Each structure stands twice: as structure tokens, then as C-alpha cells.
Image (cartoon, grey):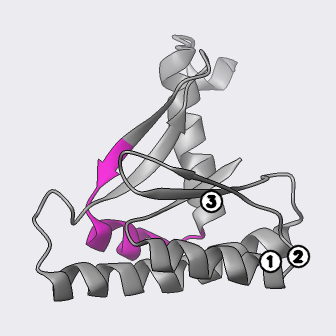
Amino acid sequence: MLEYIFFHKSLADEFTEQLQTLSIPSESKDDDMGFVIAISDDLDDERIDQANEIYEILLAKSEDLLEEEGAAPEKNIAAITLNLNDGRAVQALVRPDLLNRILGVISLQELNEFVEAITDAVDNPDDRPICQR
């Protein structure tokens, strides 16, 4: 599953509505950090790209809303979900401006692949040299 987090319910609702318009099924849940919308990572690349584009636009809106609200520094954060081998999902906190810069260069799917590779390396350390893997 690809998870998208929002700090404003209105933006989470807008994301869900836009996904429905594109016939992309999603699941919603409230989280300690905010509102999480998940879609299947088995969708075709075009549909995942569409969802990522919508999210990037709404993420920028979220940052603007937080600034307008004069959000406390602890609210002005974003998170990347790490799915561990034991079934737990944990979140790594990231500054929204940093995440926006990263997503300006690579897609959310590419970022997820990168994070999954790191998580897998931590969960399953392999001390062999790279040339032997």
C-alpha cells in the first residue's frame, strides 16, 4: 500500500474525492500524525503517477495552510512511512520543505522504492560485498 498523510481533513477529503474521480480505490484512517489515505501499490504506473501528482499539489497547499495558521514547529512536519518486516509501520518525520524538494526531483513512487530499499537493508543486513549480491 502507498500511504499519503495529511494534516488537514479538508485536504484529505479533497484527495479522496479526486481519487474517486479517477476510479482509484482508497482506504482512509485517522492517525496520531494526521489523516492517512492509502491506495494499492499494485495499480498501473499511470494511475499511481496521477495520485502522486495530486498529493504533491495538496502537500504544497498543506504547507501553506500550516504557515497561515502559524502552526507550532511540531505540527510543521511530514512523515514517510516505513513498513518493517515484522508487520509494524513506523513513521520517519521529515521537514515538509525537504520532502517538497525531494518530490520536486523524483516521484513519490521512486521515493517509496528508495525508502523500502533502506528499510529492507536495516531489517535484513547483508555483510557481503555489493559485487557478491
Foreground: disc 2 or disc 3: 2
**Distance in Å between CA atoms under marks 1 and 3:** 23 Å
Q: Which residue is mark 1?
A: 20
Secondary structure found at label 3:
helix
**Which numbered disc covers residue 110?**
3
Where is residue 126 drawn, in percent x and y?
56, 13
Q: Are marks 1 and 2 in contact (CB under 8 Å)?
A: yes
Image: magenta residue range: 92-107
Where is residue 16 drawn, in percent x and y?
67, 73
Where is residue 91 drawn, in percent x and y?
41, 41
Q: Which residue is mark 2?
A: 23
> Which of the marked residues, 2 or 3, is nearer the chain's N terminus?
2
> Which of the marked residues, 1 or 3, is nearer the chain's N terminus?
1
Secondary structure found at label 2:
loop
Which quarter of the picture shows residue 17?
bottom right
33 relative position to 56: left or right: left
Can residue 104 be spotted in the picture?
no
Which quarter of the picture shows residue 120?
top right
Secondary structure found at label 1:
helix
Q: Return the residue nearer the eye: 1 or 15.
A: 15
Looking at the rendered structure, the kind of residue marked 2 is Ser
Is 100 contained in the magenta span?
yes
Quarter that holds the C terminus: top right
Is 106 contained in the magenta span?
yes
